[in-house]
């Protein structure tokens, strides 16, 4: 076995860029109320125009952040799931083909992907927790499929690979009912996953959760069952803070991270047996252990996990300080 090196990843926003110009480097959202109010006051075309402008701004900000990652030697970036506000809101019936800036948006997204490849920066995404493929509620599943397909299409427009090197990570976010088994949940999850676009199916990973049934042990059982039953590789994204809040029998971070790393089996054409796992590294606050701290405590470093690959583990840093926290972590003499 060889020891992997540590790659630190930025999640969504850059606090360092926002310090330079908060307005220019912040993502812009739009509420349903704002959109509907614009429709009433100025007409739907104007509302769509304003939404399109905000989406274009978000994509341009994303490109700036990827350039910033390159300059800061940050080797992985999690794309924000908020780039395209409202477009999957079924009550509004928005089609992205309506966006007047769509051609420019697509051009900028392609440039984001080109920039990332040029600088060797991998990227992935983390759709919101309301996406539940294992739900018994068919309306919720339908909305989930629509949202995941949309998120995958953004990665597609960036030209990112349709595999786990550009992971789309979600929570299972469902605990088996009294009359259900883990296998029942896994089969329903898989059945609904197969209704998604290939960009979802080929990128999807699952994450151990901070409460409920799906701790690391059960996520690995879930992943193993899907692989053995359907030959469907669904890697497990290890989250150290969730593991702390919702532990498995063995509380060793390095051990649990290594177990999850072995689920990242490469099913592609590469000769490598394993892909570089993408994990989450965070820290809670004393008052609210599940809430992300601003920065990492002194000496709180991601473990160097040992797996049969020379691919570096990638740890998305989920504390609120974002790239400021990454910089401080690297300045610590104990971190190598």
Image (cartoon, helix red, strand yellow):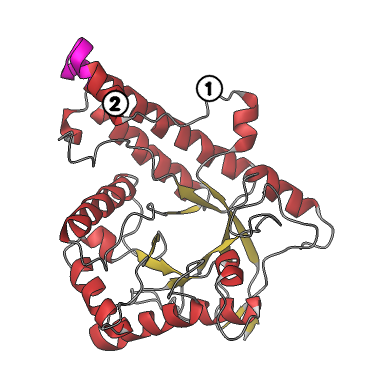
Per the rendered image, the range of residues in magenta is 39-47
User: With 271 as the anchor, is 139 left or right in this view?
Assistant: left
Quarter-of-image position of residue 162: bottom left
- How packed mark 1 is, by other alpha carbons closer than 10 Å (few <14, some 14-19, many 20 or more), is few
Nearest the eye: 280 or 312: 280
Nearest the eye: 63 or 43: 43
Secondary structure beneath disc 2?
helix
- How packed mark 2 is, by other alpha carbons closer than 10 Å (few <14, some 14-19, many 20 or more), is few
Outermost residue toward the right in this view:
333
Outermost residue toward the top in this view:
42
Dot 1 or dot 2: first in sequence order is 1
Task: Work out which quarter of the rendered image holds the C terminus and state it.
Answer: bottom right
Label 1 close to label 2 by CB (< 8 Å): no
Residue topped by disc 2: 33
Q: Mark number for residue 23?
A: 1
Name the residue at 64% across, 78% down.
254
Is label 1 or label 2 in front? 2
Is residue 36 visible in this depiction of the protein? yes
Q: Position of residue 62 (x, y in %)?
A: 46, 37
Is residue 3 visible in this depiction of the protein? no
Q: Mark number for residue 44?
A: none
Marks 1/2: CA–CA distance: 22 Å
């Amino acid at each position: 076995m060889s020891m992997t090196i540590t790659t630190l990843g930025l999640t969504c926003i850059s606090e360092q860029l926002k310090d330079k110009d908060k307005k220019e480097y912040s993502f812009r959202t739009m509420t349903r109320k704002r959109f509907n109010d614009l429709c009433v006051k100025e007409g739907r075309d104007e509302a769509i125009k304003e939404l399109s402008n905000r989406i274009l701004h978000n994509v341009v900000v994303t490109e700036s952040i990827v350039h910033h990652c390159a300059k800061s030697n940050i080797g992985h970036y999690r794309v924000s799931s908020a780039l395209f506000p409202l477009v999957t809101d079924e009550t509004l019936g928005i089609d992205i083909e309506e966006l007047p800036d769509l051609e420019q948006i697509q051009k900028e997204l392609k440039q984001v992907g080109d920039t990332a490849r040029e600088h060797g920066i991998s990227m992935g995404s983390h759709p919101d927790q309301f996406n539940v493929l294992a739900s018994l509620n068919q309306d919720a599943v339908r909305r989930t499929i629509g949202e995941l397909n949309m998120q995958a299409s953004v990665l597609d427009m960036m030209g990112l690979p349709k595999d786990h090197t550009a992971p789309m990570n979600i929570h299972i976010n469902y605990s088996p009912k009294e009359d259900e088994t883990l296998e029942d949940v896994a089969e329903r999850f898989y059945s609904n996953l197969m209704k998604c676009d290939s960009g979802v199916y080929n990128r999807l990973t699952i994450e151990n959760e901070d409460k409920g049934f799906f701790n690391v042990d059960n996520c690995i059982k879930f992943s193993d069952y899907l692989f053995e039953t359907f030959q469907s590789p669904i890697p497990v994204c290890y989250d150290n803070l969730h593991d702390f809040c919702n532990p498995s029998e063995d509380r060793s971070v390095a051990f649990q991270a290594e177990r999850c790393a072995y689920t990242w089996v490469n099913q592609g054409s590469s000769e490598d047996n394993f892909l570089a796992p993408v994990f989450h590294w965070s820290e809670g606050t004393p008052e609210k252990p599940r809430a992300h701290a601003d920065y990492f405590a002194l000496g709180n470093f991601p473990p160097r996990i040992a797996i049969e690959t020379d691919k570096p583990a990638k740890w998305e840093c989920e504390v609120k300080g974002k790239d400021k926290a990454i910089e401080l972590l690297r300045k610590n003499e104990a971190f190598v």
